[in-house]
Structures are given as C-alpha cells and as structure tokens.
Image (spheres, rainbow, N blue to C red):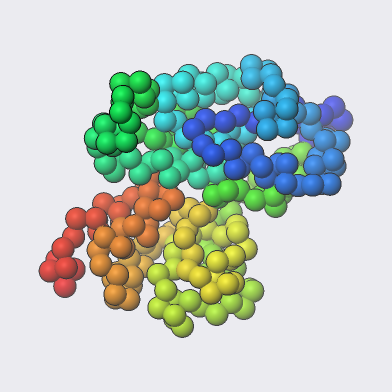
Amino acid sequence: MSKAKSKVTVAIHKLTSCSGCQLAFLNQGKALLSLLEIVEFKHFIEAGVYEPDAKVDLAFIEGSVSTPEDLKRLQEVRNNAKLLVSIGACATSGGVQALRNLADGDVWKRGVYPHPEFIATLDTSTPVAEHVKIDFELWGCPITVQQIRHFVQQLTLGTLPQPEMEKLCMECKRQQNVCVVVTRQAPCLGPVTRTGCGALCPEFGKACYGCFGASEQPNARSLANRFSGLGLVSEEVAQRFAAIHSHEPAFKAQVEHWQGLSVREIE
C-alpha cells in the first residue's frame, strides 16, 4: 500500500447505526479533496458512490451487528477487504442499541411495536470484532475528522496506526481545564475514558460522558465508588457507565454490579 502511487481503494459500509461516523469523511471539507489524491472511494453511499460488493484495499465499517442482515453483510465486507477498520461506538462496542443486551429484548419489542412479529432483530447488539477479524478500531461517538486524517496518513505512509488509549484526564491537564470532579462534584468519566474529543465537555464545565470508550487500564470500580460518594444512587452510577458503551467489558462490569445494588448494600 505504501509503495504504490496508484490510489488506495476504499469502501465505507454501514450496519445498524445513525450514519454519523460516515460524516467524519465528508466533514473534512477541503481536506477531502487532498484525500482523494491518494484514495479512491469504491463504495460510500453518503457520498453517492454505490458498489457494495467491490473488492478494496481498505474498508471502514460503522454500526453494530443487530440484525441477521447485518451479520450476513459484515461477512461479505470482510471477504472483500484486505484491511477492515471498525469505526464508532456502535461498531467497536455495540453502541447505544447494546442497552438491549441488559434487558429482555422481546419484552421491549412487544411494548413498542403493535406487530413485533415483523421486527427481525438478533437478541443482542454486538460489536464487529465479536464476529469477524478486524485490523484496526477507531473509537468515538462519533469519530472525528482528526482521527480519520491521522489514520489514513499513517497507513498511506506505510506505518501501522496506533490506537489512542490515553485517559481524557491527560488531555484536560494539557488544556488547563478545571477538574469538574474536584470543583463541581460532577460524575465525570474522564478518568477511565480514552481521549479523542479534545476534552470537549470538561472544557465547558460538563462531566465527560465516555463517548470514546474505556482507556487503557481503567479503574472503573474506584471511579464508580467515587460517584457513589458524590451522592449518586446505585441506579444512577450504573446509568453513567451504560449510556454509550454498555457492552464494553470494563463499563459493562460496573453496570451489572451497580444495577441491582440497594442503598443498604452500598453502605
């Protein structure tokens, strides 16, 4: 890929998701024109390019595996791509729709739809990596333009892209943001969340929601205990970790632990 002057062929596919991560490509603005000098999009519906079965050097895929069609499509995408990259919270951890993994999906379907027999879904919403081999992951909800640029640049220069695992707290320190946990007693997930957003929420005095997933060596139990000390009841602690990445192992462990605790057990 690095030695060739010919363009890298790229496909962008979608499973169950909001399509927000695909917009990171379009949102590059003028930089997208520079990107087009080194890559050729073979399939990218958001940009009007449609060739879903094209064989490519590099395939990006967003969305979780939530339906039988998703699973079939994912296997086809894997077979047609030399490198497969999962992008966004849905593809890397199951996304918001993975909340149903913590509940009875059939009960939810019967409660929402008048004819649930027409709804074809799997019992769970799971990340891409649970079904096929992937080569790289870009975490985030959604991913950012900077992530895309950095990843493609590294790949086309012949180096292996390195995943961002640093904690959000480090980014806050570099930007000299005031810690919202210390000063506002806010239940911020920054101490266990990987950076990537530029500490956007803490910059505006808000607690981190954990959009970019668990960082390296997340001490999630200690942070959850801290949230309890700030006054959150057990259900609120569970909800903080369940919001976006409820299927990510470190966060899932806290959701399951705190979901059923009573006040007496916490004491």
Q: Is residue 110 visible?
A: yes
Residue 112 or 84: which is nearer the viewer? 112
Q: Up-down: is 252 above or below 267?
A: above
Residue 59 or 90: which is nearer the viewer? 90
Question: Which percent across, then down, holds residue 73?
Answer: 52, 21
Question: Which percent across, then down, holds residue 250?
Answer: 37, 53
Residue drawn 51% across and 37% down?
A: 17
Q: Is residue 213 left or right of residue 253?
A: right
Residue drawn 47% across and 68% down?
A: 207
Residue 236 or 110: which is nearer the viewer? 110
Quadrant in which the C terminus is drawn? bottom left
Residue drawn 44% across and 64% down?
A: 189
Quadrant in which the N terminus is drawn? top right
Q: Is residue 84 left or right of residue 127?
A: right
Q: Is residue 204 left or right of residue 229?
A: right
The quadrant in which residue 160 appears is: top right
Question: Which percent across, then down, holds residue 119?
Answer: 36, 24
Question: Which percent across, then down, holds residue 147?
Answer: 66, 49
The quadrant in which residue 202 appears is: bottom right
Q: Is residue 105 visible?
A: no
Q: Up-down: is 6 above or below 259?
A: above
Name, please, the residue furthest toward the top: 53
Residue drawn 32% across and 36% down?
A: 112
